[in-house]
Image: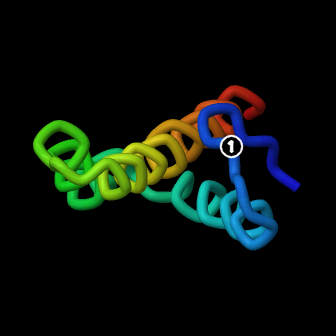
Amino acid sequence: MTKLNHYTPGTPLARVVAPLVATAVSYLPPRALRPVAKPCMRLCRESRRPRLRRFASRTIDLVVGDGMTIRVNRRGRR
């Protein structure tokens, strides 16, 4: 199972799904992550709902943080 550095799953389901999502996202080019990351960044900054901000922050940590870390590690091994 892939070790996550930026996102810490809290539920048992998230512990199973998060590494799979991070690994799948790591195969996407950085430009393809913009449609996901940009709205999440906006929600993190502008939302007044703490739960929504937390969800957006966790999504960014998982998709952009861990996904890109896996991608860099994979390229470094080549």
Location of residue 14 by image quarter = bottom right
Question: Callout 1: few (<14), some (14-19), or many (20+) C-alpha neighbours within 10 Å?
Answer: some
| Residue occupying the far top of the picture | 76
Q: Secondary structure at mark 1?
A: loop
Q: Is residue 39 above or below residue 7?
A: below
Q: Quadrant of the N terminus?
A: bottom right
- The percent coordinates of residue 56 (x first, y second) are 35, 52
- The percent coordinates of residue 36 (x first, y second) are 29, 59
| Residue occupying the far right of the picture | 1
Q: What residue sits 18% from the left and 55% below the top?
A: 39
- The percent coordinates of residue 11 (x first, y second) are 74, 63
Q: What residue sits 16% from the left and 48% below the top?
A: 48
Please name the amino acid that badge 1 sits on.
Answer: Thr
39, 48: nearer the viewer: 48
Q: What residue sits 31% from the left and 57% below the top?
A: 52
**According to the image, label 1 marks what residue?**
8
51, 40: nearer the viewer: 51
Q: What residue sits 81% from the left and 67% below the top?
A: 12
Q: Would you say 56 lies left or right of 70 here?
A: left
Q: Quadrant of the C terminus?
A: top right
